[in-house]
Image (tube, rainbow, N blue to C red):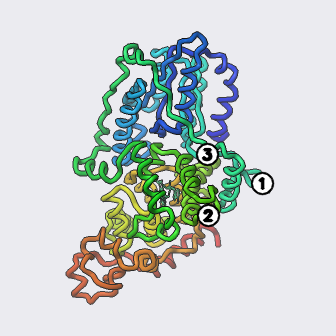
Amino acid sequence: QRPIEALKAALVETSNARHQILLGRSVVHWFRGDLRLSDNTALNLASTMAQTSESGVNATLIAMYLISPEDFEAHLTSPAKVDFILRSLKILQQDLDKLDIPLYIEVVERRRNIQNRVLQLASEWGANHVYANAEYEVDELRRDVNIIRKGVARGICFSVHHDLCVVKPGELSTKSTGKQFSVYTPWFRTWTEYVHTHPEVLEVSPPPAANPSRTREIHSTLFNSPIPSAPESKSLSSKEATDLASRFPAGEHAAHKRLKKFLSERIARYSDDRNTLSERGTSMLSVHFANGTLSARQAVAAARDANTTKKLNAGSMGIITWISEVAWRDFYKHVLCNWPHVCMNKPFKPAYAKIKWPTTPEAETLFEAWRTGRTGIPIIDAAMRELLTTSHMHNRARMIVASFLCKDLLVDWRRGERFFMEHLIDGDFASNNGGWGWSSGTGVDPQPWFRIFNPLRQSEKFDPEGVYIKQWVEELRGIEGKAIHAPFERLDIEEFKKLGYPKPCVNHETARKICTIMYKEALGK
Ligand code: FAD
């Protein structure tokens, strides 16, 4: 049984018992990857539940967030992402405080203790109902199933709701097989039809109602929980923290500000600009989606409303294209729920597990050159240095460096997937795994494995003047003209030596041939 089905089964099997549980003195909303008040499905339901008193005295709503350093390690959460979460928690706490709702924060050192701690805290607070939004990774779904069952035994109703996607996983299936789509284009057509015929999926829910002000006295110890510091392994220097705070302001207000600005200033040109590496033609909202400071519903509904046709698939090309990109995020989460093995370090298509990735010292040197931005291929080094400096990377650049790692350097794509998670501020398991699967040709609806990006062509096409390269690769800032894309090949040798920049670590044509042989061997072709 897939973990998502186990969750559904647990909710159905316990539904009678859970319905009989009476409202307690308080109701708990457990924040996880949903760090916002507006349009938060489970939070809204928790608030409604707290208001439904039969005796005339409402229950109080208590919000909680449990920080698990072991979860950060297990999920390879980057220091930048941990920092963004902590900054968002601060804002969330301030906003909840204005509604007299406490945000209780606790560090739970051992991840296995979380299940009991949730139920223990609910009991301490006289809460018989705990709400949360579903997280779709395997361990998280299994954890929630356990809490649902243990909760019922202890008289606590734990409700888990779908909130992360516009269309909930499992809702869309192919007409021919009745199963989950593995190809994006027909899936997206069905997704769009579904949203048109179920307009309620884009209805956004209001923030929670305020608690009575006496909550501050009753639960005085739960207010003003200190925001913990990042665990040692995830800490940042103060310069890094300051840079990130100005580059990626945290919290839902910042998310709405960015969305509004993008919709009014950039979305119209999105389909033209989104691949230009030097333009910030994309929304830069992924950090907010990945941490739940903005919901996909809010974003898609706002984009649709900004469209003169008020539709998802007619009118402004920029808007249509952007919505289709946000939908990729839904697609990969649907894939993860249906094929949870992608969460277990396995390629989507089992045959690709047979690729024999070299594990020689030379492969290690090449990986080192890639991850430090010292490959001697300017477009690759610019992208990797953008990641190392900002904790973000342009989507086109992600595609180029991912393809280059596995098809030119012949390094197992899973090492790149891991490295991205460890460094991205918007690290999201499903989208990252989907992106690496696409680029390496081993995933769901991939780029065909035999289509191999030529980094030079990509560089000339998407950064024609070398503006992006010069922004990130200091050594190359003085180069004029087309030599910027291939300084070793296009400058005279003395001039090249003066740059202090490495020679290309690999020859694309040679690598392409070896890669083709490796894939063919694995696939028995
Ligand atoms: P926009 O172009 O403004 O797009 C709007 C939103 O749509 C994004 O914020 C994102 O939520 C979604 N989106 C856009 N493209 C994709 C896509 N290809 N797949 C899934 N969702 C998409 N995205 C992540 O959020 N987290 C990741 O860890 C991640 N890893 C990636 C790894 C690789 C190898 C590749 C090729 C792509 C990866 N992406 C990931 C997708 C994409 O690169 C980023 O979402 C995008 O660069 C974010 O910038 P933006 O918000 O300005 O995007």
In the foreground, 510 or 225: 225
Instruction: From the top left corner, tell me how far across and down residue 194 is, in percent.
Output: 70, 50
Q: Which residue lies under the disc numbered 1? A: 177
- The image quadrant that residue 55 belongs to is top right
Which three-letter amino acid code belongs to the residue tagged 1? Thr
* Residue name at image x 57 percent, y 19 percent: 156
For the N terminus, the quadrant is top right
In the foreground, 357 or 8: 8
Which three-letter amino acid code belongs to the residue tagged 2? Gly
Q: Which residue lies under the disc numbered 2? A: 315
> Crowding at label 2, few (<14), some or many (≥20) Cα neighbours within 10 Å?
some
For the C terminus, the quadrant is bottom right
Q: Which residue lies under the disc numbered 3? A: 202
* Residue name at image x 27 percent, y 76 percent: 476
* Residue name at image x 60 percent, y 56 percent: 348
Q: Which sits earlier in the primary sequence, circle 2 or circle 1?
A: 1
Question: Relative to 182, does residue 201 appear above or below in the rendering?
Answer: above
Q: Does the residue labelled 3 lie within 8 Å of ligand 1?
A: no
Instruction: From the top left corner, tell me how far across and down residue 385 is, in percent.
Output: 32, 64
